[in-house]
Image (cartoon, rainbow, N blue to C red):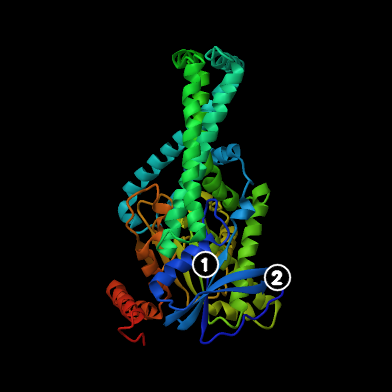
Amino acid sequence: MRHSKAPEADGKRAAILVVHGIGEQRPYETVDAFARGIASKAGAPERLSHLLFELGTEPASAVRMKLTVPVGLAQARNLDIYELYWAGDVQGRIKLRQVLGWVARTSLTPLRAWSVQPMLLFRERGAMRRKALIFLRELFRAFLLMVLAAGIVLPFAYAAREARQVAGVARSLFDAAVTAVPTGGAAMLFVLWVLVVFTGIMLARGWLRLLHARRGAQMVAGTWQGTEQQALSWWRKASATAILALTIPAVLLPWLTGFSLLNLVRSVASAISAPPVYMLLGAGVLAWLLRKPLVSYIGDIALYVTADERSEFFRLRQHVLKRSTNLLRWLLMDAGYDSVYVAGHSLGSVIAYDTINRLICEARAETHTRKTTTLRDALDRLHGLLTFGSPLDKIYYFFRQEVGPAEAIRAQILSSLHGFRKMSSGREYGTLKLEPYDVPLLENLLWYNVYSRSDPVSGYLDFYRVDKQVVCRYWNPFSAHLAYWNDEGFYDTVLEWLTWEVRGAIATGLGGDGVAESSQRFRRAVEGTESPA
């Protein structure tokens, strides 16, 4: 991989690598949201720049903003924001049935690992004072997940056992639908189906999205003007007219053809009254309704967290991790950057953590293979890790590698390979204890974890040594996981994480009040009412 130095710029430079989370992300969507959030808080009066850097065989994009006040431990005034886009690598790689099977198997984890759970759970805050509560919580969690696994597997297993009866019901349903339309039969049913589906898709994917585009343009430009905006406005009105024109025949056609909705409902109710049919139908409808979040969100997790080297998904995980490691290594080795930061949302926080952990292992291996330790030195420029909406604790709980009581050496090797800021297990190894290994301390790295109690994915990180954990007060559990990106309060925390003054407050033991005071001083500096020095 070739490496080229970035163009010179006035003052010191810092870089942030942002890693998006689960879902159908689009290229540069992540860097767009993060850059807008920082620019709205850090004071970026000058025009932003799009820069291209040579990274291997492909150019790497960055958005540069020149800040009015120094940011970061190195007090850089030029901030380059990169993104690791990995959604395209996993798109379409997993099917709904594979996701459901993975969820069912994962749901059994608390029971399968019951004998070793105390070694993990008693590392939580104040665990010894809450032993009974932790035990009852784990018992309830194991039972609830067992019910989930049974709910996924049993309807399909029962329907498979009664396959002949299910096939007969399918034929009777089609006959009932055809006979419900006396005039035209199957042909008229086809026309009705096309009209209803076409109108529904046009409404959901066309007209409603045009409304969203209008609001987005107003947020950026402040008005709904210009040729492009006028064209979109006309297109929206024309689309509404077309939807109305299609709705009229869809409503009138059943009335003109003598369509009997009541007879159809009765026929369908009679046909699906058999237990194997309505159980399969209910499970199928629920899976269909949830197919997008299951495949796009849960599927991404299933693809990345698979640690079994025999699995087809393991190679995909290694590919994503290789790309992230190459990009972060390139940023760290660029002497033009005085400091480098990594921010990861959702599953992106797990990728960010694994990337740093892998670079630490590379730096350790470097000392045994070369005379110079360039990567170890470069890691000193890694000044921050920000995890938000992070499932790190949950990933560790469900997918950690299990180690038997007698496997003392294996346990220590795994701890050595995956030990970045991880809490010690407290396990005694006696005469088999390995010599202390030389790990880069990353003393300049400040780790913030931002989470919301309403966010079902994130949480307080008990199993890792985090410098500060921040709670965002979101109330809607359905939108909380994505709420960070558009929350002004979250970007206040981002600036606090970047600000060198806050590091001084933490280092001198000022605690929360000291951090808040430093953050207020930084805000006054942005507004021009106080010098940042």
Whether residue 114 is visible, yes or no, is no
Q: Which residue is mark 1?
A: 420
* Outermost left residue: 513
Label 1, secondary structure: give it: loop
Q: Is residue 494 above or below residue 371?
A: above
Residue 433 location, quadrant: bottom right
Q: Position of residue 483 (x, y in %)?
A: 40, 56
Give the left or right position of residue 36, taking residue 19 as reference. Answer: left
Task: State the image coordinates of residue 124 (x, y, percent, origin top left).
Answer: 38, 57
- The residue to which callout 2 is attached is 56
Q: Earlier in the sequence, mark 2 or mark 1?
A: 2
Q: Is residue 175 placed above or below 417 in the rendered structure? A: above
Label 2 is placed on what type of residue?
A: Gly
80 or 391, nearer to the observer: 80
Q: Is residue 302 at least partly visible in the picture?
A: yes
Give the alpha-carbon distance from disc 2 to disc 1, as whole Å.
Answer: 28 Å
| The quadrant where residue 185 appears | top right
